[in-house]
Amino acid sequence: MKLNKDTDILIVGLGVIGGSYAKALTKQGFRIRTITQRAEDVEYAIKEGMVTDGRTTVDEDYVRAADLIIFALYPHTFVEWIERYQAYFKSGALITDVTGVKSTVVTQIQEILRPDVEFVAAHPMAGRERSGVLYSDDGVFRGANYIVTPTPKNTPEAIGTCRELGWLLGFSSVCELSPEEHDRMIAFLSQLTHCIAITLMSADAGDGLERYTGDSFRDLTRIAKINDEMWSELFLLNREALLAQMDTFMGEFEKLRSFIADGKREEMREMMRKSSARRTLFDKKA
Amino acid sequence: MKLNKDTDILIVGLGVIGGSYAKALTKQGFRIRTITQRAEDVEYAIKEGMVTDGRTTVDEDYVRAADLIIFALYPHTFVEWIERYQAYFKSGALITDVTGVKSTVVTQIQEILRPDVEFVAAHPMAGRERSGVLYSDDGVFRGANYIVTPTPKNTPEAIGTCRELGWLLGFSSVCELSPEEHDRMIAFLSQLTHCIAITLMSADAGDGLERYTGDSFRDLTRIAKINDEMWSELFLLNREALLAQMDTFMGEFEKLRSFIADGKREEMREMMRKSSARRTLFDKKA
């Protein structure tokens, strides 16, 4: 499917990410329809010119008109939606998603999905600390990565369309990873760091410390403001990969602790030098 | 001592922090002299108008002329300097420092210091990831905290002068903590977070992950670029307080790990909600 102005695009779930998709695609000249839970979100999105039309109910004809359907729902809601309404899809429709974990979700969906509809999974690695369509902002896609996670069930054509979508949304990088590689990566780069931020905020170091907070500490704990409903689901869906990263982290942390406890200064310095050198790899490219 | 344009100020150690002090105080109209190791740093600072004069050797008359001496050295170098050269101080001189840990250093210095010279310790909670006078920038003091850590040996007058220095340097907040409270605070807000960043960079999660890095991960690990000579010394000087914070952190991290492993979603959500609420306390005040 080549995306063009006649492609009928439906976004299911108009939260902060669904809304940001709607904004970006509308700016690109596409006409976007939406199905979402709350009537005020539909009204808001139409008033703001983010979508041309919207519904709060799942009507058969409304779904069947769509060539491309983007699911921006919590993982379990996405799976339930497919189970319940997939009979409504147009034959040949392409569906994609924005889910933050892949292996479990992709496997589940591809197992139950009608054979004449293709699902290519993708993860837009961008977001905001707030949820809800009012906070949608397609500017967050600039500088960010859009990751397509195809499986052997996917066709090159559908993968290509999904990649094209990433570029149209304004992402700075579009790449492919297997669902398993994606989940290992996300366990380290995103879930582990959220676990650390949560832990730092739970570790009570005494009252009043916030008065002395510097920017480093603020940077490190910014992500401690977390949507507990979504993240608890994502953590559990990626349990094995996340626990593996947590264990690796704890092992290294214990090593550093023992260097400090035993006064092994040269070992500490060596670990710091390696850490400084490795961090350079993660710098933003100019 | 009331600081005025006739106050003779000597900065010992013209690195990134000493240099930033020199810049800030020169802008305030003070005449600053320096003693530092490298001749090229003295030349650079004079050329840039950061100091009016400088030396690479510790001359008796040069030290004796100073009313206020600011030590911007590594902790052990600071202690050694006092042991070796304190006979040169003018009677009634005030000395202060920039050391990042307090209890050990303050106790050591106050034990050996001449009774006619007063040492009020302070910690400017600002810095840069680079070291050396070329990277000095008094802009880093804006929005930051200057913490004075007096002991019962200090006089209200000298504490007042040291606080005044914090405001003159351009800090947004000047406060007082006991050396022990300071060290507990710094163990949590600064040293623990550096340990975490180092650990994240040492935990090898597989090759090539840097390609997928987002801003959250960059924020969290920015401080993994670390001056290993300085930080290993600071960690060891604050060993007890730091180990206590590391242990509290590990305990909470293990708790979160077990919630994930055992699928205890409600417990995870409760921890996340508390973490979000507590993080709000650490937001920058507008």
Image: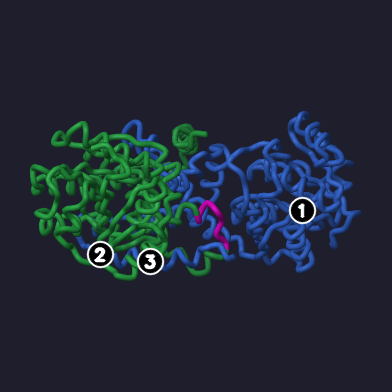
Chain colours: A blue, B green
Amino acid bearing label 3:
Tyr
Residue that carries the numbered disc 2 in the rendered image: B55
The quadrant the N terminus of chain A occupies is: bottom right
**Secondary element type, mark 1:** strand
Amino acid bearing label 1:
Ile
Q: CA distance from mark 2 to mark 1?
A: 71 Å
Residue that carries the numbered disc 1 in the rendered image: A95
Q: CA distance from mark 1 to mark 3?
A: 62 Å
Residue that carries the numbered disc 3 in the rendered image: B44
Q: Indicate which label's residue lies in the foreground, 2 or 1.
A: 2
Amino acid bearing label 2:
Arg
**Quarter of image, res A106:** bottom right
Tell me where residue A282 appears, x and y as whole percent.
50, 63
Residue drawn 28% across the image and 34% down it: B176
Q: CA distance from mark 3 to mark 2?
A: 12 Å
User: Left or right: B53 with respect to A95?
Assistant: left
Residue drawn 65% across the image and 54% down it: A124
Magenta highlight: main SS: helix
Tell me where residue B230 appears, x and y as whole percent.
28, 59
* Residue span colored magenta: B212-218
Please give the chain letter of the residue carrying mark 1: A
The quadrant the C terminus of chain A occupies is: bottom right
